[in-house]
Amino acid sequence: MTTYIMLINWTELGAKNVRESPKRLDAAKKLLGEMGGSFKSFYLTMGECDMVAIVEAPDDAVLARFALLLSSGGNVKTRTMKAFPEFAYREIISSLG
C-alpha cells in the first residue's frame, strides 16, 4: 500500500454545512475502504489547512479517483502528496551514488 498525505480545506459550502462534516468523514472512510484503501489518521488543523488525513491506497489511480470523488461533492478541496516511508527515503538517497 502507498501512503498519501491529504491536505483538505472546506469550500464555502463545506464551511456553511460544517456540522455535517463528521458524517461526510465517515462516508469518505467507507468509500476509501470500498476502493481498497484506508484512513490511517485524521486531524482537524489550524492554519493553512482545515484538515489533514494520512491515508493508504493500493496505487495512485485509486487515490486520484478518491480525491476526485471527494472534491465532486463540493464541500472540500484537496491537495495530495505521495509519502515515502523512511526506508524508501534511505534507499532513494543511497541510490544517488
Image (cartoon, grey):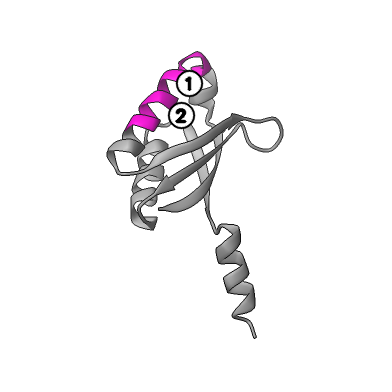
34 relative to 57, above or below: above
Report the span colored magenta: 17-30
> Which residue shows up at 50% across the image and 25% down it?
14
Q: Could you tell me what secondary structure mostly forms the magenta stretch?
A: helix
Give yes or no for contact between labels 1 and 2 (Cβ–Cβ under 8 Å).
yes
> Which residue shows up at 70% across the image and 30% down it?
46
Residue that extends furthest to the left in the rendered view of this protein: 34
Residue 34 percent coordinates (x, y): 28, 37
Residue 52, by quadrant, is: top right
Residue 11 percent coordinates (x, y): 52, 31
Which amino acid type is marked by label 2? Asn
**In terms of depth relative to the viewer, which is nearer, 23 or 15?**
23
Which amino acid type is marked by label 1? Ser
* Residue at which label 1 appears: 21
Residue 22 percent coordinates (x, y): 47, 19
* Residue at which label 2 appears: 75
